[in-house]
Image (cartoon, rainbow, N blue to C red):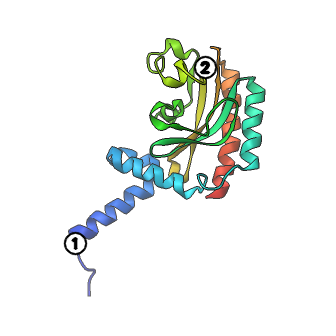
Amino acid sequence: MGKAALTPVNQKRTRQHAVAALGASGKFLLTPEQAEAERLKSLRETNLLDSGPEEPFDRIVGATRKFFNVGAASLSLIDGDVQHFKSVVGPLRDETPRQIALCTATVERNTMLIINDTLTDDRFASNPLVVGDPHIRFYAGFPLHGPRGWNIGTLCIIDQKPRSFPPSEQQVLRILAAIAQSYIDIRT
């Protein structure tokens, strides 16, 4: 007896499994809605949202703020409609609507985002977090990944005054994000 022919339903399932196995590298094969569902699934698989404060992340965020001498540092997680702070030091709320979170742009870009002066950047100049509390004028964030490479959040720094962010400091943020990433990877 030979193999049974794949039915259209089974062909669709096989394709979906193959695309899902590609992770974030297969994002281009998905609709935006499917990609977002996969990204959120990856975030959930880390169990970071429900685990409360954790000392390794708090140490990394504290060291990040101290090294850069900025107003705030955080490890943020971008959920469906909310930015949650797994760890935060400085004048930030426990959570922020995703639509105004600067870290959302970092997650969407999948690369370090640097905004030397938010008031001179058309994308962010009218953002409520820029024109109101906490009056973000400088932002730098590096994406963090969950299972299968999906962007789930950031390690970021903010300040209430504009500043430069030279390549040597960018490298330090990359290293600190890699340390945070290693703790995320251990969990999954």
**Residue 143 image point, x, y percent:** 57, 38
Q: For mark 2, does the 10 Å Cα neighbourhood hold few (<14), some (14 to 19), or many (20 or more) residues?
A: many
Distance between the alpha carbons at the discs numbered 1 and 2: 55 Å
For label 1, the SS is loop
Dot 2 corresponds to which residue?
Answer: 138
Report the side of 19 relative to 40 (left or right).
left
Instruction: Name the residue nearer the viewer: 32 or 167.
Output: 32
Give the answer, above or below, for where 180 lies relative to 48: above
Eye-nearest disc, 1 or 2: 2
Nearer the observer, 127 or 14: 127
Assess disc 1: are there few (<14), some (14-19) or many (≥20) residues with their C-alpha within 10 Å of its C-alpha.
few
From the viewer's perspective, is residue 19 above or below residue 181?
below
Q: Tell me what residue is drawn at x 58 percent, y 55 percent.
A: 46
The answer to whether the residues at label 1 and label 2 have Cβ atoms under 8 Å apart is no
Number of callouts: 2
User: Residue at position x 44%, y 16% from top?
Assistant: 122
**Looking at the figure, which quarter contains the N terminus?**
bottom left
At label 2, which amino acid type do we have? Phe
Residue 125: x and y, percent?
48, 16
The mark found on residue 70 in the picture is none
Residue 136 falls in which quadrant of the image? top right
Q: Is residue 64 left or right of residue 149?
A: right
Q: Where in the figure is residue 52, as x and y percent of width and height?
A: 67, 52
Three-letter code for the amino acid on which mark 1 is drawn: Thr
Quarter of the rendering occupied by the C terminus: bottom right
What residue does disc 1 label?
7
* Numbered disc 2: secondary structure: strand
Q: Residue furthest top?
A: 120
Residue at horizontal 71%, vertical 36%? Answer: 176
Q: Which badge, 1 or 2, comes first in the chain's sequence?
A: 1
